[in-house]
Image: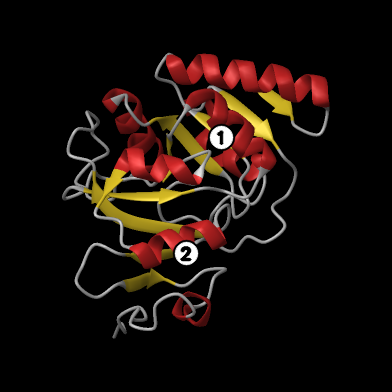
Amino acid sequence: MRFDCSVDEEFDRGLLAAQAVLEEGKLVVLPTDTVYGIAADAFNPQAVQSLLDAKGRGRQMPPPVLVGAPSTLDALAVDIPSWLRSVVTELWPGPLTVICRQQPSLTWDLGETHNTVAVRMPDDPRALALLKQTGPLAVSSANTTGDPAALSVDDAEDMLGDLVAVYLDGGRSTTGVPSTILDATGSTPRVLRIGSISIDDLHAFNNTIEPPEATT
């Protein structure tokens, strides 16, 4: 099923359909503020595995979790430093993924997370509308591994086809730039990937944040 998010009535029907199939353990493609994402119920291990299978990705690359409000971070993570709270307050919703220590009480299986969780609040009203209905979702870029990220619902459908139950069409991505990934689990925080948010932006909150390690 495919729904046009630019038509209010159709978008409302799409949200209901997306919520229903996610509850059944199926997959949804949705627009975000970066690229299109493929989503599964984060608390359904079979659904998360279906997401990884659809992408052709192993458990060693667990998906991030998208949330609908900054306060949800406390439900998913522990040992959140005060500077990171300031980052989230200032830069969420937005293209920043933060990796934190996972709440030990969480009963989910995102893959080989090593007791960490990557969390982001997207700056997209359609994604947020869905997240407010469903709660946290496991979401990865809507493409098969090794292929470019999907910048439109057509791109996603060409790669993922019938593996996805509902496609929410939000038009073409305006940026196509992925989120910046900040790992705050170690003694020294480090950026793992530079995206829309620069290292200088993050140094305004903590000047000890290190840039990505150089690759050879």
The residue beneath circle 2 is 87
Residue type highlighted by circle 2: Val
Asked if residue 140 shows in the view, the reply is no
Which quadrant: the C terminus?
A: bottom left
Tell me the SS state at disc 1: strand
Tell me the SS state at disc 2: helix
The residue beneath circle 1 is 29
Residues under labels 1 and 2: Cα distance?
Answer: 28 Å
Give the residue displayed 60% in from the left and 16% down from the top.
17
**The quadrant where residue 138 appears:** top left
Location of residue 1 in the rendering, given as x and y in whole percent from the top left corner: 63, 20
Residue 93, compared with residue 126, is above or below; it is below
**The quadrant where residue 131 appears:** top right
Give the residue displayed 24% in from the left and 46% down from the top.
102
Location of residue 8 in the rendering, given as x and y in whole percent from the top left corner: 81, 25
Residue 84, compared with residue 28, is above or below; it is below
Along the line of sight, which residue is nearer the eye, 204 or 30? Answer: 204
Dot 1, how many residues are within 10 Å of its Cα: few (below 14), some (14-19), or many (20+)? many
Dot 2, how many residues are within 10 Å of its Cα: few (below 14), some (14-19), or many (20+)? some
Give the residue displayed 67% in from the left and 36% down from the top.
126
